[in-house]
Image: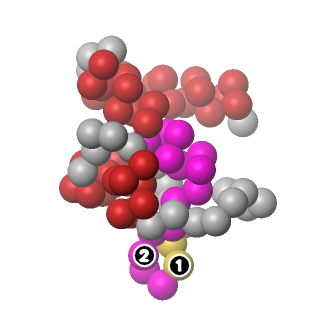
Amino acid sequence: HEGLSMALSESDVVAAVGGITARRLRALIRRGWVQPERRGGAPEFSEIDVARVRLVCHLTDRLEVPEEDVPLILSLVDQVYG
């Protein structure tokens, strides 16, 4: 996450990503699908984190990918984009 633009708060991510709530965002973090930095206990999201949230929402909401398949897809994306 280093070297990217400013860190975003949870509310920034909710505002930037249509159709996600703070509760759902926290669920994505609990599952390990999004891994924001932690500073003073509050999560700080990078632009990459926001893109990952958008991808998960697109997969599950629009493409109706079952949630149990999301970790595999994210792993493949991580391998491709490092």
In the shown orientation, is residue 63 left or right of residue 53? left
State whether residue 43 appears in this view: yes
Q: Is residue 8 left or right of residue 31?
A: right
In the rendered image, the quadrant that contains the N terminus is bottom right
Task: Provide residue 19's location: percent of width, then percent of height.
Answer: 27, 39
Q: Residue at x 46, y 25 (%)?
A: 72
Q: Where is mark 2, residue-wise?
A: 42
Which residue is at the front of the view, 82 or 21?
21
- Amino acid of disc 2: Ala
- The magenta segment: 40-53
Q: Residue furthest right?
A: 3
Above or below, 82 against 45 in this view is: above
Label 1 Cα neighbours within 10 Å, binned few <14 / some 14-19 / many ≥20: few
Q: Residue at x 28, y 44 (%)?
A: 20
Residue at the farthest bottom position:
40
- Mark 2 is surrounded, within 10 Å at the Cα level, by few (under 14), some (14 to 19) or many (20 or more) other residues, namely few
Give the spatial CA distance, label 2 vs label 1. Answer: 6 Å
| Residue 72 colored in magenta in the image | no
> Picture coordinates of residue 76 (x, y %)?
58, 24
Residue 33: tell me if it is visible: no
Labelled disc at residue 23: none
Q: Are marks 2 and 1 in contact (CB under 8 Å)?
A: yes
Q: Is residue 51 above or below residue 62?
A: below
Circle 1 sits on which residue?
39
Is label 1 in a helix, a strand or a loop? strand
Colouring scheme, one of rainbow, by chain, secondary structure, one colour: secondary structure
Q: How many numbered marks have been drawn onto this rendered protein structure?
A: 2
Local SS, label 2: strand
Q: Residue at x 62, y 33 (%)?
A: 78
Identify which residue is drawn at 42% across, 75% down.
42
